[in-house]
Structure formats: structure tokens, C-alpha cells
Image: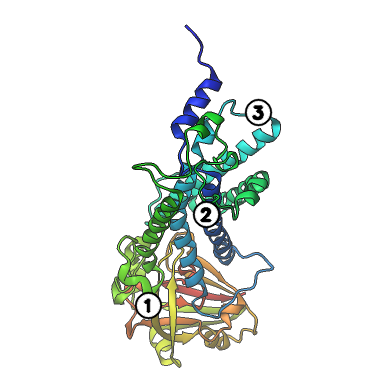
Amino acid sequence: MHKPDPQRLTEALAAKFCSPTRSSRLTVVLGRWLGVSFTICFLTGLFSHGLQNPPSWMIFPTSPVWIYQLTQGLHVTAGIASIPLLLAKLWSVYPELLKWPPVRSLTHGLERASIAVFIASSLVQLTTGLINTYKWYPWPFPFRETHYWLAWVIWGSLLVHIAFKLPVIAAHWRARPAPGSTHTSAADDGGLTAVGRASGSGRAGPGRWSRRAFLTGVAAATGTVVLTTAGQSFSWLAPANFFAPRKMGTGPQGVPVNRTAADAKVMELASSDNWVLHVRHGSTKHAFSLAELRALPQHTQELPIACVEGWSQMATWRGVRMKDLMDAVRAPAGSALKVTSLEPEGAYRIMNMPAEYAQDGKTLVALELNGSVLDLDHGYPARIIAPGRPGVLQTKWLHSVEVL
């Protein structure tokens, strides 16, 4: 028996996969689109992570009130758009992964390693991120921390990959086939061997796509998944929201709910006639009953509830300004707060509120939603609503507010 010749096998595979569609120019264009979507995901993800795990230097913008609604909507929408873009880019380069030998030098080995890390981490990131929008967690690791660190792995491996491929990217950034050309150039064939080039042409044969048609198809697929899911984040696209897990205008009082009172195990405590809100600053304490809160000056604000899973909705909230409650216990200006929920457990049972939100007149201890008393699933008897914050930090079923 003769051992197969790796070189002949590579040439045979190159001939098999040679296509006028697959080229370095196509890969560069797809990489450019994917780079934009990944950059949007990375930057908006850092902003969301900073709001939930604030570094000491972070500034917390409270205006415009829809800033988190916008950034997290872009984050999830760009992530969904990245799925068809990544699959198309992998299709454009996968013959390269079959070349022999797999590693030809130290530099080539580092390049292949960066590609392997980028592909693996991107597939895991996009898959788990999509599943997270449905609040399904079939894995044993913590999603948020893993999502955050994978973003850095993806970004780092992407920069390394770009550094290695910069000459090819520069050569094909604006390249176009010469008019009347019938052959794919050596520089434009995705790096396939001479055998593969010999059978390829710059034009699409019968039943095969041209590069332009393929890019049009990818753009159409990406646009379709965006248009049919982004309506959970952007009201002007809501009529086309066919596939996102949340739809605007649904749920109690016309606003979706992520975590119900039953899930939080607070139904009995939240419904108790003896409920009071404890507000404390040092030795100064005040326990506000629901009747006392309703007797205080009431304020109305149009603020969105915007969740990390990507959905959001503007709503009308009415209640007591947080800074009025702080004044009641003589808290100094610029104070931060620790807010505690009636929930017996949970990652967000205790929430720290930076001074920017505590002092903003739009931050409310809300008692009403869309013109009626808060539904139990929306945080009755009282909840936090503040401008520009993730929904997980808009604490429901309030128990206490402590001035730090």
C-alpha cells in the first residue's frame, strides 16, 4: 500500500474547493463587516459590565435616560448580526484550514493559533450569548463572568490575527478584479495552490454564486435576523419582531417581566400589610409605610426598563424621588446608597447605587406603573427606577435603603 502524499491531497482539496466566490477579497470584506459588529459588541459590553461592576474611575451618565436601552440593544443586535457574518467568513477561508503541513514555521504556527483561539472563542461567545437572551443556562459556568473574559480573548486574538494578515488586508481592502478578467489571481484566491487556481475563474459558472451575489446574500441574511429580532430593543422595529424572546407591550401593565414574584419567593412578604421601607443614614432611621410613601410628593417620569438580555421598553413611572427620601434622613449630597430587596437570595438582592443616580431627580422609588399601582411581578409595593441603568439594578420589592 502507498502512503497518501499530503501535497497531492492538498492539491486535490484545493481543486475541489476552488470557487470564483471564495477569495481573499471576499474574506477581507466579510472581515470588515464582522470587525464592525464585534467592535460594537465589545465596547457596549464593556459599558454594561462597568455599570454592574463599576471601577473606581467610572463616570455614570444619567442622561439621556435611554443610554443603556441604546447600548445594550446595540450589543445584542450586533451579536445576533455577527452569527451569519462569522459563518460566512468561516466558509470563505475553511479550505485554508486543510492545507498541509498545518504548521510551516513559528510565525505560521502563531498565526494558526490566533485563528484557532478566535474561532473557538467566537463560536462559544455567540452561541451562549444567543441562548442567554432566552434566559436559558444549560452550562455549569457563570455566564456573565465567562462572557466578559471571552470578549477580551476574542478581541486579543482578533488583533493578533489582523497583525499577521495586515499585508493581505491592505492589498485587498479596495481591490477589484480587472475589467474583463477571467482568472482569479494568485493574490485573490484565498491562498489556494496552483492546482486550485487553474480550475477557478473570476466568473460564476452555472449554478454557482458570484462574489457579489454571495455578499448580497450574506447582507440580506444579516439584515433579516436583525429586523426580525431588534424590535425587542427598538420600538420603531417592534412590528417586525417575530423571533426575539421578548415583545414590547406584553406582560403585566403592558411591560415584560424577567423575574416574577414567585421566582423571587417574595409573594408573602411583598403582599404583607405590615410592609415598610427602611431608610437609614448612620443613626438616623425612618420606616416609611406604603401609606406614608403615597402621602409624600409624587413625581412622574418616562423611563425605560432595559435588560441585559437586550429587550427594553419605555414606560411611565410614578413615585417618590430618591433624593427626597435621602433628605428625610439628612443624608449629605454626593452620597451613594445600598439598596436591599425582600428577596431572600439572589445575585441582585443587594444593589449599590452610585451618587450620580441617587441625586438625580428622575430616580424614583416607584409605586405606580403606566397609571396604576405596581403589579406584584413589577415590584409591588415599591421598586427602584433610575435613568440609564440595567434592569437587574432596578431593584424590585424594596426592603431598605442605606446611605453610605
Q: Residue at x 53, y 87 (%)?
A: 361
Badge 1 is on which residue?
A: 381
Res 223 visible: yes
Q: Is mark 1 on a helix, strand or loop?
A: loop
Q: Can residue 160 be seen in this view?
A: no
Q: Earlier in the sequence, mark 1 or mark 2?
A: 2
The residue beneath circle 3 is 104
Residue 366 at x, y percent in the picture? 42, 81
Q: Determine which residue is flagged by label 2.
A: 34
Q: Is disc 1 surrounded by few (<14), some (14 to 19) or many (20+) residues within 10 Å?
A: many
Q: Callout 1, which amino acid?
A: Pro
Could you tell whether 243 is left or right of 90 in the image?
Answer: left
Percent position (x, y) of residue 63? 55, 80
Marks 3 and 2, how far apart at CA: 28 Å
Residue nearer the viewer, 377 or 399: 377
Whole-percent x and y of residue 268?
A: 32, 68
Distance from the alpha carbon under mark 1 to that under mark 3: 67 Å
For marks 3 and 2 on the same chain, the one whose residue lies earlier in the sequence: 2
Answer above or below: position of 62 versus 148.
Answer: below
Residue plotted at (57% across, 41% down): 185
Amino acid type indicated by mark 3? Arg
Foreground of the two, 11 or 69: 11
User: Of discs 1 and 3, which sits in the foreground?
Assistant: 3
Provide residue 134's location: percent of width, then percent of height.
37, 56
Residue 296 appears in which quarter of the rendering?
A: bottom left
